Amino acid sequence: MLDDVDQFLREVVEECALLKKEKDDVDRKIEVLADKVREYRNDEDALPKLTGAQRQGHQVVNEANAAADPL
């Protein structure tokens, strides 16, 4: 009977160690994903500035082309 309990406890310890390793792996993956989300949010915040600059650039080119046509 005592051997059965000892064997069960060893199995529980092994399973706990495996679950801890899996949890640590999942925690690392979550951290990587959270970093990516922060990176994408930063990119998303910069996007309106970039599109505004792009619009301005197109406007300057169009104005330059319009000014150059009569010449």
Image (cartoon, rainbow, N blue to C red):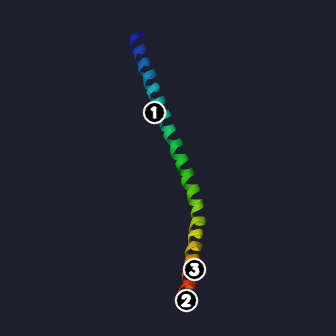
At mark 2, the secondary structure is loop
Residue 41 lies, with reference to residue 56, above or below; the image says above
Instruction: Identify the amino acid type marked 3.
Output: Ala
Residue 58 lies, with reference to residue 27, above or below; the image says below
* Residue at image mark 3: 64
At mark 3, the secondary structure is helix
Give the mark nearest the N terminus, 2 or 1.
Answer: 1
Give residue 70's mark: 2
In the drawing, does residue 38 fall left or right of residue 16? right
Q: Nearer the viewer, residue 14 or 58?
A: 58
Give residue 8's mark: none
Screen quadrant of the N terminus: top left
Q: Residue at x 51, y 46 (%)?
A: 33
Q: Position of residue 41 (x, y in %)?
A: 57, 56
Proximity of marks 2 and 1: CB atoms separated by less than 8 Å = no
Q: Nearer the viewer, residue 39 or 54?
A: 54
Marks 2 and 3 sit apart, C-alpha to C-alpha, by 11 Å
Q: Residue furthest top?
A: 2
Query: Which image quadrant for residue 55?
Result: bottom right
Give residue 22's mark: 1
Q: Position of residue 58 (x, y in %)?
A: 55, 75
Q: Position of residue 5 (x, y in %)?
A: 42, 15
